[in-house]
C-alpha cells in the first residue's frame, strides 16, 4: 500500500483525517507530530494516532530548530506582519513542511497530508513549502476536500470511534507554539466584540497582574538574544523564561483585523508574550547600534520579510537573501536592554552596547559638550538653500 505522512496535532480534524485517508485513498497513514513548543501531552497524541490506526506515529522535538532557524532569524529582521502579528504560526508551517518531506523520504511515502481547510493561509504555507522542497510529493489536504461542516466532522468521528475531545466544544480555532498563540472564530468573528476573558489562556488579565513591576535585562549577541540578567541561556529556555514573566504581567495581547493571503479580512487575537518583549528589546538595541539610514532601510526589509513569511514563501531565494543581509546588518547589534513589565505593558527603560553610536559628549547639554554649535548656521544655510530658492520663486505660504 502507498504511504502518506500526515502532520498530526491530535485534534479533531487530523484525527478524522487518519481514518478518512485510509477510507478514501486506501493509504497507510504515518503521523508526524512536531513539537515546536507549548504542546500538551505528546505521548498521548502519539498513542491516539496509533489507536486510530496509524501505521507509525512519530513525535519530533523540533524546538531547537524552530528557534534557531526560524524564530531568531525573524526576530533579527523584526518581522511583524502588518505591524502587529509576530508570525508564530507562519514560521512554524515551513518547519513542519520540512519535517514532513524528510519523513516522507525516509519512509518512502508518495504523499504528505495536513489538516488545513481551503480558506486559510496555512494550506498555502504547507503546499508551497512542500512543493519547494520535494516537488514530486503529492499533497493531500483532507479537510479541504471532504467538505464537512464542524457538526458533520463530529458525526463522522462518532461513527468511526474517534474520541471527540472536549476542546472540540471550544468555540475557537486555536494554534500555538513557543512564539505565540492565535485565536479565531466564535464571537471573535464580530470585529466590534471585545474578546471575552476565556480567549486568553497564557497572559494574565491586567486585573490579576502584580502591583509591583518586574525588570529583566536581555543580552543580545549580533541580534540574537543570549542571556537574561547576565545568565547565558539556550534559545528555547530563554524564550520560555521571557514567556513566563511576560504572561505574569499580562504582556503580549494583540487584537488585529488581518489581511489573509487568500483575500479574506479576518479578526485575529494573539497572545505573543515572548515575541512582544524580545522584539521591543531588539529594536531598542538596534536604535543605538544602527545608523539612521540602516534603521530606515531595515524597516523596509522587515516589512518585505514579514510578507514573505506570512505568504508562505519562507524557502524562497528572496527570503534567504534578505536573511543574509539581515545577519550582516546585525554585526554590531550586541549589548543589553533593560525592560520593565507592568500591568500589560512592556517598556524599554535602558540599553547599552560596546558598539553604541550614542555619544554622550554630542548629546549632552551639560558640561563636556563636544558638539560645535558654531558650525550649525553654515549647515543650516546649505540645508535650507533649496527651500529658500522655492520661496523666492513661488512665494511659499502656510496653508489657508
Ligand atoms: N492568522 C494567523 C496566520 O495566518 C494564524 C493562523 C492560525 N492557524 C490555525 N489553523 N488556527 O498565521
Image (cartoon, grey):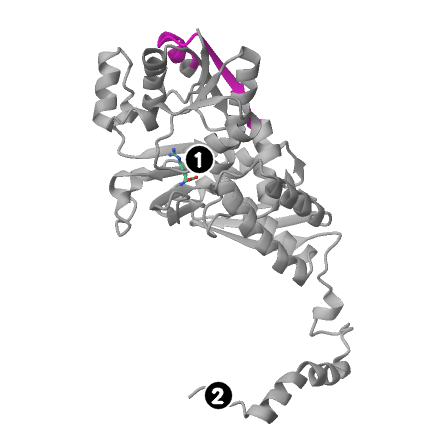
Compared to 270, does 359 lie above or below? below
Where does the image place residue 7, in percent across and percent down from the top left? Answer: 44, 22
* Front in this rendered view, residue 262 or 338: 262
Q: Residue 55 appears in which quarter of the rendering?
A: top left
Q: Is mark 1 within 8 Å of ligand 1?
A: no
Please tell me which residue is depicted at 64% across the width and 33% down the height of the picture. Answer: 233
Is the C terminus in the top left, top right, bottom left or bottom right quadrant?
bottom left
2 or 1: tag closer to the N-terminus: 1
Compared to 266, does 379 lie above or below? below
Please tell me which residue is depicted at 59% across the width and 52% down the height of the picture. Answer: 301
Query: Is 37 covered by the magenta stretch?
Result: no
Where does the image place residue 220, in percent across and percent down from the top left? Answer: 66, 44
Is any part of residue 238 visible from this angle?
no
Real-space Cα separation, disc 2 to disc 1, in angstroms: 51 Å
**Alpha-carbon neighbours of circle 1 within 10 Å: few (<14), some, or many (≥20)?**
many
Range of residues picked out in magenta: 46-63
Which residue matches tag 2? Answer: 398
Is label 2 in a helix, a strand or a loop? Answer: loop
Q: Residue farthest to the front?
A: 136
* Front in this rendered view, residue 336 or 297: 297
Is label 1 in a helix, a strand or a loop? Answer: helix
Query: Is 61 covered by the magenta stretch?
Result: yes
Is the N terminus in the top left, top right, bottom left or bottom right quadrant?
top left
Where does the image place residue 332, in percent across and percent down from the top left? Answer: 73, 50
Picture quarter with ligand 1: top left
Nearer the observer: mark 2 or 1; the answer is 1
Which residue matches tag 1? Answer: 124
* Front in this rendered view, residue 123 or 9: 123
Amino acid at each position: 500500500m502507498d504511504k502518506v505522512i500526515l502532520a498530526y496535532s491530535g485534534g479533531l480534524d487530523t484525527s478524522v483525517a487518519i481514518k478518512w485517508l485510509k477510507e478514501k485513498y486506501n493509504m497507510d497513514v504515518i503521523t508526524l507530530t512536531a513539537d515546536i513548543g507549548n504542546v500538551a501531552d505528546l505521548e498521548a497524541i502519539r498513542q491516539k494516532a496509533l489507536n486510530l490506526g496509524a501505521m507509525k506515529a512519530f513525535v519530533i522535538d523540533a524546538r531547537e530548530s524552530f528557534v534557531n532557524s526560524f524564530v531568531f532569524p525573524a526576530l533579527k529582521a523584526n518581522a511583524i506582519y502588518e505591524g502587529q502579528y509576530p508570525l508564530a504560526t507562519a514560521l512554524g508551517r515551513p518547519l513542519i513542511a520540512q519535517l514532513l518531506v524528510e519523513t516522507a523520504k525516509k519512509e518512502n511515502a508518495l504523499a504528505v497530508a495536513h489538516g488545513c481547510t481551503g480558506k486559510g493561509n496555512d494550506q498555502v504555507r504547507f503546499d508551497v513549502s512542500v512543493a519547494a522542497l520535494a516537488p514530486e510529493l503529492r499533497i493531500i489536504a483532507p479537510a479541504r476536500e471532504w467538505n464537512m461542516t464542524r457538526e458533520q466532522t463530529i458525526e463522522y468521528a462518532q461513527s468511526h470511534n474517534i474520541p471527540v475531545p472536549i476542546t472540540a466544544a471550544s468555540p475557537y480555532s486555536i494554534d500555538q507554539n513557543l512564539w505565540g498563540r492565535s485565536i479565531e472564530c466564535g464571537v471573535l468573528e464580530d470585529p466590534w466584540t471585545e474578546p471575552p476573558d476565556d480567549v486568553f489562556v497564557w497572559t494574565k488579565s491586567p486585573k490579576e497582574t502584580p502591583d509591583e513591576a518586574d525588570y529583566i535585562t536581555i543580552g543580545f549577541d549580533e541580534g540574537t538574544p543570549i542571556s537574561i540578567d547576565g545568565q547565558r541561556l539556550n534559545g528555547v529556555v530563554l524564550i520560555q523564561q521571557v514567556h513566563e514573566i511576560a504572561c505574569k504581567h499580562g504582556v503580549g495581547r494583540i487584537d488585529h483585523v488581518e489581511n489573509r493571503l487568500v483575500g479574506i479580512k479576518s479578526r485575529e487575537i494573539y497572545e505573543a508574550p515572548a515575541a512582544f518583549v524580545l522584539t521591543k528589546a531588539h529594536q531598542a538595541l538596534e536604535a543605538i547600534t544602527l545608523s539612521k539610514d540602516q534603521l530606515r532601510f531595515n524597516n523596509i526589509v522587515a516589512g518585505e520579510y514579514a510578507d514573505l513569511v506570512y505568504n508562505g514563501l519562507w524557502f524562497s531565494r528572496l527570503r534567504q537573501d534578505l536573511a543574509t543581509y539581515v545577519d550582516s546588518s546585525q554585526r554590531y547589534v550586541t549589548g543589553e536592554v533593560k525592560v520593565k513589565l507592568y500591568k500589560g505593558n512592556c517598556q524599554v527603560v535602558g540599553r547599552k552596547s560596546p558598539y553604541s553610536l550614542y555619544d554622550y559628549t554630542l548629546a549632552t547639554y551639560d558640561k563636556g559638550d563636544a558638539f560645535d554649535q558654531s558650525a550649525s548656521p553654515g549647515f543650516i544655510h546649505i540645508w535650507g538653500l533649496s527651500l529658500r530658492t522655492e520661496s523666492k520663486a513661488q512665494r511659499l505660504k502656510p496653508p489657508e
